[in-house]
Image (cartoon, rainbow, N blue to C red):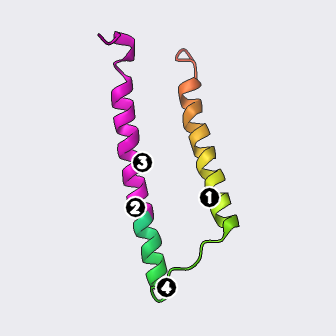
Amino acid sequence: MKKATESWKAPVYFVGALIGVVFGLISAHMYARAVEENNEGVTPRVETGEAFRLGLTAIGLMRQITELGAKNPSD
């Protein structure tokens, strides 16, 4: 039997997954559209430095989301 204090986790996971899927699809669409408009449909090579910066940005976003959960509810 689930504890009442853990009943909030499933909706959080569901909403998080849904947001991730929607954000990923929109990002992929925007990337593909930019490639088609600017590079005659030839996919440019993503440089290692660009991928690294994007990864660091994603980690920063995850840290900010984590900090939302770390706040004291009485604040």
Going by the numbered disc 4, the residue's amino acid type is: Val
Quadrant of the image occupied by residue 45: bottom right
Going by the numbered disc 3, the residue's amino acid type is: Gly
Give the position of the N terminus as an image quadrant.
top left
Magenta span contains residue 36:
no
- Count residues near mark 3 (Cα–Cα under 10 Å), then give few for <14, some for 14-19, many for 20+: few
Residue 13 drawn at (x, y percent): 39, 34
First reached walking from the N terminus: tag 2 or tag 1? 2
First reached walking from the N terminus: tag 1 or tag 4? 4
Query: CA gap, disc 4 to disc 2?
Result: 20 Å
Query: CA gap, disc 3 to disc 1?
Result: 16 Å
Residue 54: give its label: 1
Q: Specify the segment rendered in magenta.
A: 1-27
Residue 23: give its label: none
In the picture, measured across the screen, residue 57 lies left or right of residue 18, that is right
Residue 42: give its label: 4
Name the residue: 38% across, 51% down: 21
Query: CA gap, disc 4 to disc 3?
Result: 27 Å
Q: What element carries label 2?
A: helix
Q: Is mark 3 on a helix, strand or loop?
A: helix
First reached walking from the N terminus: tag 3 or tag 1? 3
Residue 74 drawn at (x, y percent): 54, 14
Q: Name the residue under label 3.
A: 20
Residue 26 drawn at (x, y percent): 40, 61
Query: CA gap, disc 2 to disc 1?
Result: 16 Å
Mark 4 and mark 3 in contact? Answer it, CB < 8 Å. Answer: no
Is the stretch drawn in magenta largely helix, strand or loop?
helix
Magenta span contains residue 11:
yes
